[in-house]
Image (cartoon, rainbow, N blue to C red):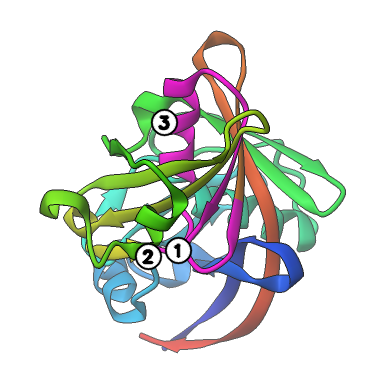
Amino acid sequence: MTAKLHVLRVFVGEDGAGGNPLGVFLDGDEVPESERQSVAADLGFSETVFVDDGEHGEVRIFTPGTELPFAGHPLVGTAWLLAREGFSAGCLRPSAGEVPVRHSDVLTFISGRPEWAPAFEHVRLESPEEVDALSGPPDDRDLVGAWAWEDENAGIIRARVFASRLGVFEDEATGAHAVRLAAELGMPIEIRQGVGSVILADPKSEGMVEVGGKTEFVEVGSYEL
């Protein structure tokens, strides 16, 4: 038995740099619930999404090690793909709750609550060069974002995120971390993460934070179950 798998890059930066790979099964019911965690582990993406109802935006998100109630780059990428495939869902529904979706030119945005995201620690360093020089997470923390201002007046941040607790040593672009950091700072920010990814995050009303960026299609193929 095979299932169709879409592969995307989410939070793509300038000139096509970066972007966090994402696997999406648009027909999630092709993959039995009992096999989804093992499929996500086998694929090895930082997250894999199973869409159970495209019109209503019902989705489930798995890292190689666990299921998440909310995550940024999987929801941004899935929202982009659903729109590309002709679905009209105005929000996504992971287990955390209703996640509004917005499209603007080539960018896709979702909104979520910081408390829905994994409990990332934030470690501020003195410079982007210190962030770049890290060989692993500060003090071997297992769920942490290390960051520094590139331009504080412009709200531009350099960050790297390590999440071994979730089965991901270092993530290329982490929307859930961006949601928590923007909420903590209380201001719109642009995060430059990984090898070239760009994430926009902006605190909104009623405790929500909007996060978004550019998604690009990579390929569609078959996964053997």
Relative side of 171 to 51, left or right: left
Q: Which one is closest to the eye, mark 3 or mark 2? A: 3
According to the picture, the residue beneath numbered tag 3 turns out to be: 180
- Measuring 31% from the left and 61% from the top, which residue is drawn there? 63
Q: Quick one: SS at disc 1? A: loop
Residue sticking out furthest to the top: 206
Based on the displayed image, in which of its 4 quarters is residue 121 positioned? top left
The residue type indicated by label 2 comes to Ser
Q: Is residue 97 visible?
A: yes
Residue neighbourhood size for the residue with mark 3, other residues' Cα within 10 Å, grouped as few (<14), some (14–19), many (≥20): many
Q: Quick one: SS at disc 2? A: loop
- Measuring 52% from the left and 88% from the top, which residue is drawn there? 222
Q: Nearer the viewer, residue 16 or 155?
A: 155
Question: Residue 143's x, y, as percent?
Answer: 23, 47
Relative side of 145 to 174, left or right: left
Q: Are marks 1 and 2 in contact (CB under 8 Å)?
A: yes
Question: Residue 109's x, y, as percent?
Answer: 67, 41
According to the picture, the residue beneath numbered tag 2 turns out to be: 46
Q: Quick one: SS at disc 3? A: helix
Q: Quadrant of the C terminus?
A: bottom left
The residue type indicated by label 1 comes to Glu
Q: Quadrant of the N terminus?
A: bottom left
Question: Residue 75's x, y, as percent?
Answer: 54, 48
Find the magenta span and give its range: 171-198
According to the picture, the residue beneath numbered tag 1 turns out to be: 172
Residue sticking out furthest to the right: 105
